[in-house]
Image: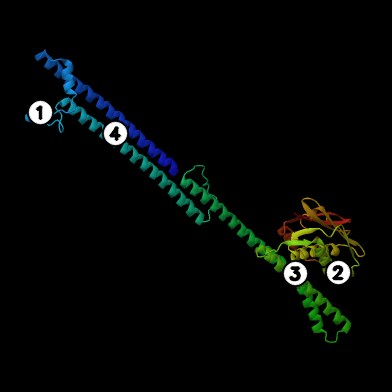
Amino acid sequence: MNRKKLNLILVSLFVVLLVLLIVNTKKYLHDYTVNTNILLAKIVCLVQEKYPEVNKKDIIGLLNEKDFKNNLTEYGIDIYEEEISKDSERIIINMYVSNFYIIIFALIIVIIFINVYVYLNNRNVKKLIYYVEGINKKNYKLDIISNKESDLSILQNEIYKTMVMLRENADNSLKDKKNLKDSLSDISHQLKTPLTSISIMLDNIIDDPNMDDSVRNDFIMDIKREIININFLVYNILKLSLFDTNTVKFRREKVKLDEIINTSIKNVSLLADLKNINIKVEGNLDYFIKADTKWEIEAITNIIKNSIEHSNENQDVIIKTRESDVFTELSINDKGVGISSKDIKNVFKRFYKLNDNDNGFGIGLSLAKEIIEADNGTIKVKSEVGKGTSFIIRYMK
């Protein structure tokens, strides 16, 4: 029960008490008036019987005079302090007694009501204490939601919200621990192969001091390449960790697609030249999007790099742009090996590889998705095995 209802009930009880007192007092005053009129009638009849010459109107007029002098004091009667008629005195006493009983009865009702109210509140408070103790013991399966409108019910619902939040935090904490464990396992697995290769090549160099210079140089170049791969992996893992901990601060500004696309192409130009991949741009590059330039270049670079890695030599990677009233679209298309329907749903998962022959770490696309979605964009992939893959990115206006 809320305070407004409680006040309304108490006011209603007071009004009922007041009405009962008025009705009861009015009843006894009526009896008092009737008794007084009977006494006056007796007096008038008695006077007229003894003094027939006296007119009734004169007697009644005398009785209604305002300047009446108390002539009964000589008989020991003070008309201002006591009743002459015992019946009138009895009526007044009965009125006081009945009003007293009404007040006592009303007080009992109020006391009972307050005690019931306090009892119910105490019971609800104990219930809330039980709920809080259960939550402190990590019991998040309590059914404590209430549909009532009292202050305690509101508090109960707030406790329920807190419990739901704590349960979600607990679930997320367990999920985060599992994700961390899986990520550490994946990172360990990803690092194991290049580190093993480096270790084997170094052992070969150390064990064979007379190794041919060309072979030694090949080993050294392979070691350098593996170190670059490890550096790339660590660098991208650190970036992903920034998103996991919500410590990335995006500086969104109006930027031309031209700046993002051209810089991204420049970042992968060496890789494209090695495979003789021609990167073509179709569409208007003067479109503007609202994004963090540095992070978007990182995302688009990773996607173009993925398209080059999964294309055959001497093929094209085509970048297309278009705009609508709702979004600006950028698509990156290759004519490479394609992705099967089984694998396409996993391409943005961390450390996911399409096959054992995939030389990537399975981390670039995951990072790209994190960046694009953080910049109020969406990314999806369409692919057909043997015909190529398209990554469609839309930046909402």
Q: Tag 2, which secondary structure?
A: helix
* Whether residue 253 can be seen here: yes
* Quadrant in which the C terminus is drawn: bottom right
For this rendering, which residue is in front, 217 or 54? 54
Tell me the quarter of the picture where residue 209 sits. Answer: bottom right
Amino acid residing under circle 2: Ser
* Alpha-carbon span between mark 1 and mark 2: 130 Å
Q: Is residue 349 visible?
A: no
Q: Which residue is mark 4?
A: 102
Which mark is nearer the camera, 4 or 1?
1
Residue 268 location (% of width, % of height)? 84, 68
Q: Which disc number belongs to residue 269?
A: 2
Task: Compare marks 3 and 2 and give the one earlier in the sequence.
Answer: 3
First along the sequence among labels 1 and 2? 1
Residue at horizontal 91 percent and vertical 67 percent from the top:
276
Asked if residue 33 lies left or right of residue 301, the reply is left
State which quadrant residue 166 falls in. Answer: bottom right
In this rendering, position of residue 187 left or right of residue 275: left
Q: Amino acid at mark 4?
A: Ile
Q: Where 224 sits versus 23, above or below?
A: below
Residue denoted by label 1: 72
Measure the C-alpha gap from mark 1 to mark 3.
120 Å
